[in-house]
Image: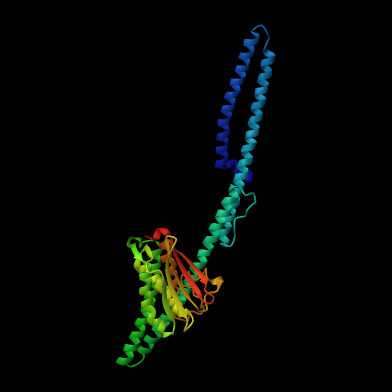
Amino acid sequence: MLLANTLRSSTFRLALFAIAVFGLIVAAIMAYVYFGTIAYVESRVGDAGDHSGFTAMIELAMIAAGVLLAVLAGLAAVLVTRRTVGRIEEINAASRAIMLSGLDRRIPLRGSHDEWDRVAENLNQMLDRIETLMGEVKQVSDNVAHDLRTPLTRMRGRLEKAYHTPRNSEADAALIGDTIADLDAVLGMFASITRISEIETRARRSAFRALNLTEIACEVVELYDAAAEQVATRLSLNGDREVAITGDRDLLFDAIANLVDNAIKHGRKGGQVTVTCRSDDGGAVISIADDGPGIPADQRDHVFKRFYRLEQSRYTPGNGLGLSLVAAVAGLHGAEVALRDNAPGLTVRLSFPKTSAL
C-alpha cells in the first residue's frame, strides 16, 4: 500500500523529473568525456593504430556507469519518496483520528529531530492551543449561563409574583426598580464583553495621547476613597508626581479603577491599599498593593480569563470580567501585568515599556 502510494505521489513524479534532468546532464558530460577521450587518443597516437578495442572498452564503461547511475538514482528516488510519503501518511492518519475521536490525541514523533518531527511538534502545539481555547470557551459558556441564570430567575420570579398579586403602586415600583437593576447588571456584563473584545482588536489606539499616569491614579483614589472608608481601609497614593505615558486615558482609568476596587473588596477590612506610580528606566510602572488574603500562586495565571472567579460558587457580586479588562488594556498599551505576593496580600504591577512613555 505504501509503495503504491509512493509511486502515485506527486513527490515521486517530481523526483523522477529531477532524475531525468540530472540524467541528461550526466549523459552530456559522459558524451563529452567519451568523444574527448577518443579525440585525445587519436591526437596522440594517430590513425595508425586500431582503436576499436579501446573504444569498445570506453563505451562499455560509459554504459555501465550510466546504468549504475540510473539504478542508484531510481532507488534513491523511491527511498526518499517512500520516507516522505510515509511521514505524510502518518500525519494524515493521526489527523483523521483526531477529527474522529477528539483533541486528546497527538501526532506521533519519531525522535529523529528532523524537519518532519518539527512539523509534527508544531502541529501538536497548535492542537494543544486549540484544546486550551476550547476548554476556555466551554468554561466561559458555563460561567455566562450561571451568571445569567441568577438575575433572569429573579426577574421571572418577581414578574410572576406581581402577575398573581393585586396592584400596589409601592410594591410595583420596588419590583420595577429591582428588575431594572438586574437588567442593568446583565447589560453591563455584555457591555464589558463587547468592550474587552474592542480593546483586544486594538480599535481604541486612535485615542492615545500624552498623559500623566499619577494624575489618573489620583482621580481613581479620590473616587474610591469613600468606598474604602466604609470598610475602614486606608487608601493612599505614593510615588512620583509626574509619570509620563502615552495611552488611552479612559481605558487606563478603568483598568486602575478595577484594580483598586478589587483591592478594597478582596483585601483585609481595616487594612491598607497602596497605589504607587513611578518612572522606571524610561518606562512607567503602577502597582496596587493590599494586605488581604491574596491569590494562590496556582491561580494567578487563570484570574485574567473572562468570567474566572476564585469563588467557584459565584454567589458573591461580580462577573469575573474586571481583570480581563485590565489584561486587555495592558495588552493594548504593550504593558506587562504581574501578580506578586505582598506578604501578606497581593501586589498587582503594570509595567509600561519605553515606547509608551513620552
Query: Outermost residue toward the top?
Result: 48
From the viewer's side, name the closer residue of 291 and 150. Answer: 291
Residue 181 on image: x %, y %: 36, 82
Name the image quarter holding residue 258: bottom left
Q: Residue at x 45, y 64 (%)?
A: 351
Query: Hey, which quadrant is residue 9 in on the image?
Result: top right
Kindly tell me whether residue 233 is visible in this rendering: yes
The answer to whether residue 305 of the structure is visible from this angle is: no
Colouring style:
rainbow
* Vertical order, 202 against 52 (above or below): below
In the figure, is residue 326 to the left or right of 104? left
Query: Is 20 in front, or is 266?
Result: 266
Disc count in the image?
A: 0
Residue at the farthest left position: 169
Quadrant including the C terminus: bottom left
Q: Residue at x 41, y 84 (%)?
A: 229
- Relative to 47, residue 153 above or below: below
Q: Position of residue 77 (x, y in %)?
A: 61, 38
Q: Position of residue 339 (x, y in %)?
A: 50, 69
Q: Which residue sits furthest front?
A: 240
Residue at 44% of width from left, 82% of height from top? 233
x and y percentages locating residue 137 in the rendered image: 48, 67
Residues 355 and 177: in front is 355
Observer-nearest of 331 and 139: 331
